[in-house]
Amino acid sequence: MGESGAERPPEDEGEAIPRTDRIDLKDVDNQVRDLRDFAQGLLTEKIYLENEIGQLKKRSSRLEEELRHLRSPPFIIGNVQDVLDDDRAIVRSSNGTVFLVSRNRRLPEAELRPGTRVALNQDSLSIIDVLNDAHDPLVAAAEIIDSPRVDYDDMGGLDEQIERLKEAIELPLLQPEAFVEFGITPPKGVLLCGPPGTGKTMLAKAVATQTQATFLGMVGSELAQKYIGEGGRLVRELFDLARQRSPAIIFIDEIDAIGAKRLDAATSGDREVQRTLMQLLAEMDGFSEVPDVKIIAATNRPELLDEALLRPGRFDRIIEIPLPDEDGRKAILNLHLGNMPLERGVKIKSLIDSTEGFSGAEIKALSLEAGIRAIKDGRKKVSTDDLSNAVEIVKKNRNKSLDSDQIHYG
């Protein structure tokens, strides 16, 4: 009864329960490795974002500084007339008004002298800073830093004119002592006159290429300004820059824009042009004459120029550049057609005859038109028909130009 009456322990006690969710160590290593890679990626991204935040802060700081400068009131540009003492000076503002103002003691006294350009406070007009002397941007841009790639050999039929220009401009710059020994004053200026397209501007560019002098080039219309005194100031600054850069050559194209004959009955605009002309005459005479500054001017209408401009001592040589004659047209055609592939049978002689009255620019345009037609048709060489057609095109363009001029001036 004891065995049968004894209680039987539960089946689950003392028996091993099988494990079905055991963790594989290999999987754990993979998970740890993945977590490390993920953490490393987060760290890299954090460093990148911190760098980007630093760059954005620097950019924000620069923009705030720029905004502060933009919001600051502008200064007035003036010139010192006189320095009275350590605290006061007389200045002329940009509008011409003269003021007695205070000066900044931190500015070196040696830099403040009559004529110095200064910045003035907009409210008190006190001197804030000393500015470097600078020429008008229009005058500063007149200096040709890189010489034009034009040579005397690029012009045909102008041998006599080239020689006379060399004698008047290049010779005094290259051999100034020879003129002193002979006791003569070298030519100061040369006027190139002739019809449009005959090579006046190209001659000036060739001089810039040949000589080592500083070349300053301006168009006469740029010197004809709207406001009183502006044209004269530009002329004065142009010659000042030439003296600073000497030896120098000043080239004024279309000088008739400011050099026309002076008339009694004139508008305010005409009077301002006359003031510019008088300043030009004064600069060409000049009390402080600089021998190594030469002037070349060009015009299509020499009959319009004032007599005071044409007298000896200003423009000592007047070189006329006419339309090319037969020999000149031959030289220009050989120059422009020399490197052009031509078909056999093309006769330059007939082309010389058909271009009578053409300028050098028109002959150049003729060769361009002939080359374009050959390229358009897919040919490798220029034919006689191309050249004949080009001659007709240039003649037609010239007739249209003449008709428009007659309508305009009629």
Image (cartoon, rainbow, N blue to C red):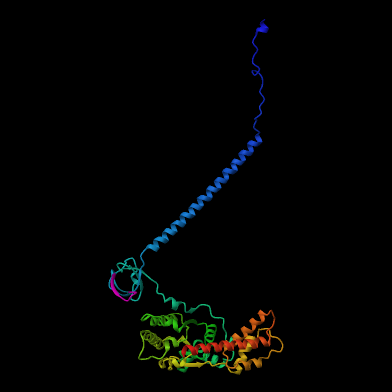
Magenta-tinted stretch = 93-101
Q: Is residue 386 left or right of residue 242?
A: right
Q: x, y (%) of residue 127?
A: 32, 69
Q: Is residue 361 left or right of residue 77?
A: right
Magenta region includes residue 361: no
Seen at 44% across and 81% down, the residue is: 222
Q: Is residue 254 visible?
A: yes
Q: x, y (%) of residue 194?
A: 51, 91
85, 162: nearer the viewer: 162
Q: x, y (%) of residue 242?
A: 44, 82
Give the farthest residue toward the top: 1
Seen at 54% across and 83% down, the residue is: 209
Seen at 44% across and 59% down, the residue is: 63
Residue 148, quarter of the rendered image: bottom right
324, 366: nearer the viewer: 366
Q: x, y (%) of residue 174?
A: 51, 87
Magenta region includes residue 94: yes
Tell me: residue 114, above or below residue 335: above
Tell me: residue 26, above or below residue 110: above
